[in-house]
Amino acid sequence: MEKINALISPHSRILPTLISYSSFPISLSLPNPNKDVQKSYSRRSLTPSLLTPRPTRSRRTSSTHFRRLSCTRAASAVEHEPSLVVKNKAAEVSNELKGTSIFLVGMNGTTKTKVGKLLADVLRYYYFDSDSLIEQVAGGESAAKSFREKDEGGFRDSETEVLKQLSSMGRLVVCAGDGAVQSSTNLALLRYGISIWIDIPLDMLAKEAIESVGQCSQTWGISGSDTFSEALAKLTEVYEEMRGGYATADATVSLQKVASQLEYDDVEAVTAEDIAVEALKEIEKLTRVKKMMEEAARPF
């Protein structure tokens, strides 16, 4: 197979790390584990496409236009700015977390992605999606799919190598693909951080898969012509296969449980912020238990 050597968005403050193996050399640019995130960074999630600063354009505008633009941006900021509840909980957890990375496992979907980016934002962490990284180094979604079909073993090796690099870094929120829970090696790598299973109802995922058929849908064997029942049946089969791996996570955040606690009639009313708060609570519990164990182990 033709070798691929891809460097993801170089940046002066990002430490390049090169790891190569037999047929699929990967060159990733990831944060330096010895340096905290600089305050000068944007607080938005640093996906590969956002690592390189974009040039800004200057243009003359009238005062009226400026006021309208300012109002629009202010409204947008209010809409997307994390609530004080999420921010305060993140502030409480951050000190004890001490830069430990967070790995989100579970069936991929927009909800899991939104939660990952929100956690990265409020904790001032970097955000990465392991499946997206594999696609980047493979040369795109179609190239990654072709590589997987031609060399399943090589593709699994690439998942392990990407996860190995991510697990060696600190201050990351990683949305991990299903490959992260399909081998003992990958499960061991998740132990370098805190793993959380974002458990999303399958009917929500089936509806999403039908409405927008993408990489996840293709991985699950769902096509645009599938009915809801067919998509749900395929998702159920994948879920049953992966559930054992998901259950090894350090904590579980179930959308159905969150909806019940918040007394929502519809599980789809649960927002990314609701899930993020619950995830932060679970992280807080884990860090407290770790601290108690460390204190208990100290000699008198």
Image (cartoon, helix red, strand yellow):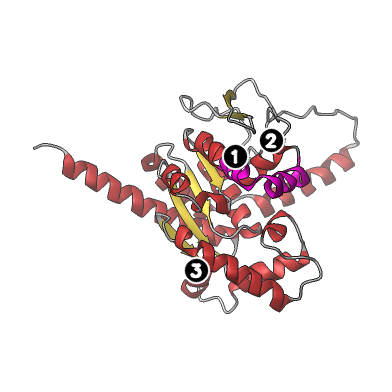
State if disc 1 and disc 2 touch (CB < 8 Å): yes
For the C terminus, give its image quadrant.
top left
| Magenta-colored span | 140-159
Give x and y (percent) for residue 163: 53, 40
Residue 158 disc label: 1
- Give the residue number, with chain letter if any, for mark 2: 137
Q: Give the amino acid type for the residue marked by disc 2 in the picture.
A: Val
Magenta-colored stretch includes residue 293: no
Give x and y (percent) for residue 144: 71, 44
Magenta-colored stretch includes residue 154: yes
CA gap, disc 3 to disc 2? 36 Å
Dot 1: element: helix
- Which residue is depicted at the point 84% across and 46% down? 68
Q: Give the amino acid type for the residue marked by disc 3 in the picture.
A: Val
- Which residue is depicted at the point 62% across and 43% down? 155
- How crowded pointer 1 is (Cα within 10 Å; few <14, some 14-19, many 20+) is rated as many
